[in-house]
């Protein structure tokens, strides 16, 4: 017997993804929205960067609203940290507390003329992955590295493809899907 299980993945044409990457366009293919679960009482932590606060605040607000929309009884705690580089430390502390079912890392890094932004982004990415694997906990990475304010506003302030909403959907899907392995 073969059991086919969808774990929230979606088919993306490699050619389409490469085309979007080369053109600098935002990927228009997003995972489907999870169903609403009014009986869920999961807990989520959002760790957000104070740097670029107005943009990150929008990410956090959209993520919180989407989490509550998908799981009305969910507990959502938001922790503000100085900058994106500090996010992994606080994500790790939240993971160690074992109080949360998923963690969302939200921040914005604007690429400048030096390698500093890329170095921060690489360190954050590797750290968040390691925390997720160490604690076997969904850690949703939405610490965005963007080239300019236009990209930042499209991803943070917009409603069509707001990365805060996408982070919340990913957190809910990942949390629910992980239950399959923890039965």
Image (cartoon, helix red, strand yellow):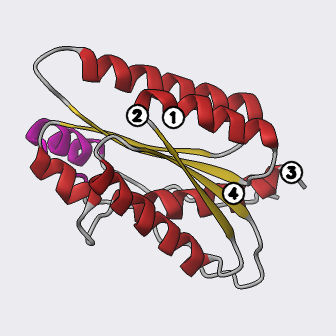
Mark 4 element type: helix
Q: Main secondary structure of the magenta part?
A: helix
Q: Which residue is mark 4?
A: 175
Q: CA distance from mark 4 to mark 3?
A: 11 Å
- Number of the label disc, if any, that sits on residue 87: 1
* Marked residue nearer the N-terminal end (4 or 2): 2
Question: Looking at the image, which is closer to me, 178 or 57?
Answer: 57
Residue 144: percent from left, percent from top? 33, 41
* Marked residue nearer the N-terminal end (3 or 2): 2
Q: Which residue is mark 2?
A: 83
Query: Mark 4 or mark 3, which is nearer to you?
Result: 4
Q: Residue furthest bottom?
A: 38
Q: CA distance from mark 2 to mark 1?
A: 7 Å
Residue 157: percent from left, percent from top? 25, 63
The residue that appears at 14% across and 25% down in the rendered structure is: 112
Image height of 123 relative to 82, above or below: above
* Marked residue nearer the N-terminal end (1 or 3): 1
The reply, left or right, for residue 53 in relation to residue 177 is left
Range drawn in magenta = 14-27
Q: Is residue 28 visible?
A: yes
Q: CA distance from mark 1 to mark 3?
A: 27 Å
């Amino acid at each position: 017997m073969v059991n086919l299980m969808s774990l929230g993945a979606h088919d993306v044409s490699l050619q389409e993804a490469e085309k979007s990457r080369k053109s600098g366009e935002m990927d228009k293919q997003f995972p489907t929205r999870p169903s609403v679960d009014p009986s869920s009482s999961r807990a989520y932590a959002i760790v957000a960067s104070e740097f670029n606060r107005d943009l990150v605040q929008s990410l956090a607000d959209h993520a919180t609203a989407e989490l509550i929309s998908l799981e009305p009884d969910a507990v959502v705690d938001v922790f503000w940290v100085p900058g994106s580089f500090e996010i992994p430390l606080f994500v790790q502390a939240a993971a160690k507390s074992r109080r949360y079912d998923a963690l969302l890392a939200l921040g914005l890094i604007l690429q400048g003329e030096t390698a500093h932004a890329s170095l921060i982004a690489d360190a954050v990415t590797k750290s968040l992955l390691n925390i997720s694997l160490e604690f076997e906990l969904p850690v949703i990475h939405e610490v965005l590295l963007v080239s300019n304010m236009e990209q930042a506003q499209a991803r943070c302030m917009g409603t069509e493809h707001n990365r805060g909403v996408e982070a919340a959907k990913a957190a809910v899907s990942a949390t629910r899907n992980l239950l399959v392995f923890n039965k």
